[in-house]
Amino acid sequence: MKYRSSTEIIDSILRSVGSGATRTRIMYKSYLSYTQLNEYLSLLLERDLIRFEPETQIYKVTQNSAKFLDAYEQIRELVQEPKMKNIEELR
């Protein structure tokens, strides 16, 4: 797996959480170790990007996470390499 920036990891976590996910599900869907997961979950809780429901042990996204995901998607589109339609364009 290629190196991922912390922003890419946060994007992956937020997408894994979706409408609700357990700690284990987030860890496996985001390809993180237990230690990494704990660090990122603490950060995301601090920044109000996710919330934790103790009675169900489920993490959920907040409105702030929707803003983050929208902004991150816009940035990805701006820096994305153009896709080639076919090999003929190279000639």
Image (cartoon, rainbow, N blue to C red):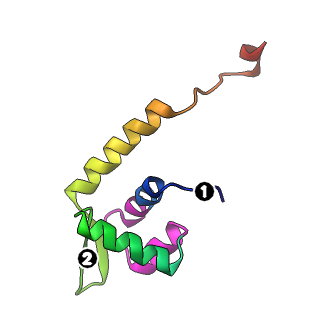
Q: Position of residue 23 (x, y in %)?
A: 40, 79
Q: Please, what is the three-letter code of the amino acid marked with disc 1?
A: Tyr
Element carrying mark 1:
loop
Q: Which residues are magenta?
A: 13-31
Q: Is residue 64 above or below residue 76?
A: below
Q: Please, what is the three-letter code of the amino acid marked with disc 2?
A: Phe
What is the total number of numbered labels drawn onto the structure image?
Answer: 2
Rendering quarter of residue 84: top right
Relative horizontal placement of residue 10, taking residue 49 as reference (left or right): right
Q: Position of residue 40 (x, y in %)?
A: 39, 69
Residue that mark 1 sits on: 3
Q: Position of residue 9 (x, y in %)?
A: 47, 59
Rendering quarter of residue 42: bottom left
Residue that mark 2 sits on: 52
Relative horizontal placement of residue 70, taking residue 83 as reference (left or right): left
Relative horizontal placement of residue 89, taking residue 39 as reference (left or right): right
Rendering quarter of residue 64: bottom left
Q: Residue at x 38, y 36 (%)?
A: 74
Q: Residue at x 23, y 61 (%)?
A: 62
Residue 25 forms part of the magenta stretch: yes
Quadrant in the picture for the C terminus: top right
Q: Position of residue 87 (x, y in %)?
A: 76, 21
Q: Nearer the viewer, mark 1 or mark 2?
A: 1
User: Dot 1: few (<14), some (14–19), or many (≥20) neighbours within 10 Å?
Assistant: few
Upstream in the sequence, badge 1 or badge 2? 1
Q: Residue at x 51, y 68 (%)?
A: 29
